[in-house]
Image: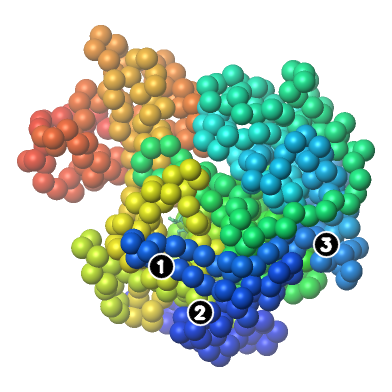
Amino acid sequence: MNQSANVYPVKPEFAAKARITRERYEQDYAESVAQPEAFWGRVGHRLDWMRAPTQIKDVSYDLNHFRIHWYADGELNASVNCLDRHLANRGEKTALIFEPDSPDQPAQHITYRDLHARVCRLANALRGLGVVKGDRVTIYLPMIPEAVVAMLACARIGAIHSVVFGGFAANSIADRVADCGSKLIITADEGLRGGKKVPLKANVDAALKMPGTNSVETVLVVRHTGGAVDMQMPRDRWYDAVVDSQPAECVPERMNAEDPLFILYTSGSTGKPKGVLHTTGGYLVYASFTHEAVFDLQEDDVYWCTADVGWVTGHSYIVYGPLANGATSLVFEGVPNYPDYSRFWQVIDKHQVTIFYTAPTAIRALMREGEEPVQKTSRKSLRLLGSVGEPINPEAWRWYYDVVGEGRCPIVDTWWQTETGGILISPLAGAIDLKPGSATKPFFGVVPALVDASGQVLDGEAEGNLVLLDSWPGQMRTVYGDHQRFIDTYFRTYPGTYFTGDGCRRDADGYYWITGRVDDVINVSGHRIGTAEVESALVSHPKVAEAAVVGFPHDLKGQGIYAYVTLNAGEAASESLHKELIAHVRKEIGPIATPDHLQWAPGLPKTRSGKIMRRILRKIAENAPDQLGDTSTLADPSVVDSLVKERRVP
Ligand code: WTA
């Protein structure tokens, strides 16, 4: 194949105005890895510190001396950096544009001054309710301005927020509340997505009946849809009743750079989701710096990231990065296909969005509808497009580039993780030529490497497991309450490195191509689901004896969820039980974990020691029975034949 046909060189007209040009990238990258202290010390000046850090980097991945500290003697407050410091010059600038679910409802423009006042009021209210530095606060809100206000109010008083995605069900809320011992929950009466109501408060009520959740003293309820909810006094309080009367100034807490800023739960290979903990200084330096550099942020940009604040993308690139940079960040409550498939493009025209950041799954879904819904709109305001969450297939990339961006806008395909806090591999549009499907080159300070199964580092053109050889300020610091799990999960597989869990190829030009997870995490529409979580939801059903879950390639979602279920002796498989089990998973975890296919499995392929051989199950789900490989080590090889025969054809 002619490689050069697949290269989209840096556009000279973009580079002419870009923050970072090719030369600058090459020089600064070299310095960032050769002298990280000097480099990150300088970058650290972008924040307002209450006490400037003198210790920049103190990191060892050596398990005997393990530590990750950045800016360790610095003191700052994240909300001050996102709000107060902009008041002098950007007080009247729009911080947030809120675009509601329905285009018939008015949009809101919230200035930095307004946002500051709103955050201070809630921060005062939280203090009044007894929340102090270090306490955990769970946020379970729709994509409305209060979600941003809530995060920043926690940051202001040093409370650690844990945002739980509004699509998670009661059980998932309860697990997350119990794990971190939240004192307070901020929720809304109901959410609204694509015209459908989501019973948020009712889900919280159900969660708080579950064991382990009695740390919660108060539930603050935002009136959003006005729908009826049960208020249980004195636990439940209306947000407006508690917040509106508070003073619009609030003295911020002085935080050490390494004090926790937030916990965000994410799925791993095993067990329950883990509480990824990010700290204040390094995270904020990294989120704001990457946001400015990767999106080539200019003062008058209108920036829109379509993620939900329930995911890390929302944390770093709707809230902390953009607001620390004094940008205008659009908060969208809705979905891409409501009221119709032009919605994204109409919002872009309505608010004259210049930078648009979304996920491949959304692009594929919109692509399927053809060009007409796009062509109806102008999109002339756009100048830069971004992608995140999963590998973007070249076909979707080209559609995004040609149809959405009309060949005018570079695409930044940004690879990163909840754990990394910010973007690690991505083009910089003024500096790096693009190749559809490749996240291209490492960001400043990031040292990727590929290793084979034995941990041998591979040079040059190669494919292997992606590890990172050095730290960056936005790196997670621990798994909340389980530091050992942090070390075991990320630093023990390939000693001396951080293991990402992703597979990756490096081409002859040194470009990185992420190939997807190599562990038992399924990436469904850009959302991480652990196979173990879905399995444990299935076996919690009284009729299920055993379950095994794998991912399979899915046209729209990237990966889908395929479940094999063995029923208890005496239970009969039926269509109604099939439906019931799928509904059960939705109820236990949430709609995002809905299995796409569920196959009855009289037996599962196991080794003689009882280990389920997922490799085989994956191949059956992929409909590649000719690639099953060696099945002779199975305790009962015949189960494979029957599974292949009974495969549920998508
Ligand atoms: C995948 C989302 C390819 C990857 C920010 C990673 C990607 C996981 C990309 C993290 C990309 C994310 N290209 N794969 N541009 N971005 N991924 O924690 O498998 O929700 O490990 O963070 O998504 O998902 P998470």
- The local secondary structure at tag 2 comes to helix
Q: Are marks 1 and 2 in contact (CB under 8 Å)?
A: no
N-term mark: 1 or 3: 1
Q: Position of residue 210 (x, y in %)?
A: 55, 21
Q: Position of residue 212 (x, y in %)?
A: 53, 25
Q: Amino acid at mark 1?
A: Ser
Q: Which residue is mark 1?
A: 60
Quadrant where the C terminus lies?
top left
Residue drawn at point x = 65 percent, y = 22 percent: 205
**How many angstroms separate mark 1 from mark 2 (CA)?**
14 Å
N-term mark: 3 or 2: 2
User: Which label was assigned to residue 13?
Assistant: none
How did the renderer colour the structure?
A: rainbow
Quadrant where the N terminus lies?
bottom left
Q: Which residue is mark 2?
A: 36
Nearer to the camera, 308 or 628: 308
**How many angstroms separate mark 3 from mark 2 (CA)?**
29 Å
For residue 212, say whether it is visible. Answer: yes
**How many angstroms separate mark 1 from mark 3 (CA)?**
35 Å
Give the crowd class for mark 1: few <14, some 14-19, many >=20 residues within 10 Å.
some
Q: Which residue is mark 3?
A: 84
Q: Position of residue 398 (x, y in %)?
A: 52, 66
For residue 266, say whether it is visible. Answer: no
Q: Amino acid at mark 2?
A: Pro
